[in-house]
Image: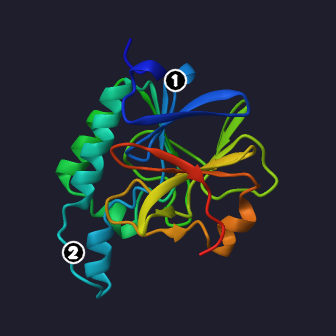
Amino acid sequence: MTGTMEHIKNSFQFSLAGVPLCALGTGALWWPDQRLLCVSDLHLGKAERLARRGGPVLPPYETRDTLDRLSQDITKTDAATVVCLGDSFDDLASAQSLSDTARMQLTGLQAGRRWIWIQGNHDPGPVELGGAHLQDLKLAPLVFRHIADPVAQGEVSGHYHPKAKLRGTARPAFLVDTARVVLPAYGTYTGGLRCTDAPLVQLMQEPALAILTGSSPLPIPMPRRP
């Protein structure tokens, strides 16, 4: 059966609040019992926003690349629900400037499934791109929001773009403790916060796990010192 734990390659299985979850090597989170795929911080349109504001000019292909990878994860899991965990767009103008091709691709990805946009700090609020727009999503025993609440339990969040370093190489990483999982940024043009930086050290309880993304997701104890 498509989408079960046993059939998701390039992934690492763990549990949160008693819920079996799967960290995919792409940076997406899969909840098989709900057929729910969660991604965070797509930052669609970042290249356009940087150019518009006089920043470095980057090849304007990140939106297509991000959506192509998301399409592959949706196909691989056969997700019935997709949750975009905030900062899906780099700013309001980025959302408004999406190409017709990108809009059509999003429409195709949404067809036949529930699609939820969680509000992030970059997000413009509801946009005319289909799906539901929520501040957070409660699916007991889990809650999905953009920025972590330090006292929450069973929380799935994003925002920080966590990265962990192993043998001198930094990779985007999931951070997991007994209370929460913080997702890495899914977008192609996104930086990251080192898991040794104060906001993440203070947020994550000990012991915490860093699951490095890539072709072979790798769990390591979350580094807390540079």
Task: Give the label on residue 58, or none.
Answer: 2
**Relative to 144, residue 62 above or below:** below
User: Residue, x 44% and y 19% (percent of image)?
Assistant: 6
User: Residue, x 38% and y 26% (percent of image)?
Assistant: 77
User: Residue, x 28% and y 36% (percent of image)?
Assistant: 72
Q: CA distance from mark 2 to mark 1?
A: 36 Å
Residue 4 placement (x, y as % from top left): 45, 19
Extreme front residue here? 167
Q: Which image quadrant for residue 179? A: top right
Q: Which image quadrant for residue 143? A: top right
Residue 89 placement (x, y as % from top left): 40, 60
Q: Quadrant of the N terminus?
A: top left
The answer to which of 60 and 212 lies nearer the viewer is 212
Q: Are marks 2 and 1 in contact (CB under 8 Å)?
A: no
**Relative to 16, residue 128 above or below:** below
Looking at the rendered structure, the kind of residue marked 1 is Pro
Residue 137 placement (x, y as % from top left): 64, 40
Task: Give the label on residue 32, or none.
Answer: 1
Q: Earlier in the sequence, mark 2 or mark 1?
A: 1
Q: Quadrant of the C terminus?
A: bottom right
Q: Residues within 10 Å of mark 2 (few under 14, many from 20)?
A: few
Looking at the rendered structure, the kind of residue marked 2 is Leu
Callout 1 secondary element: helix
Residue 175 in view in this figure: yes
Asked if residue 156 lies left or right of residue 37, the reply is right
The label nearer to you, 2 versus 1, is 1
**Relative to 69, residue 99 above or below:** below
Residue 75 placement (x, y as % from top left): 30, 28
Task: Give the label on residue 101, or none.
Answer: none
Asked if residue 190 lies left or right of residue 100, the reply is right
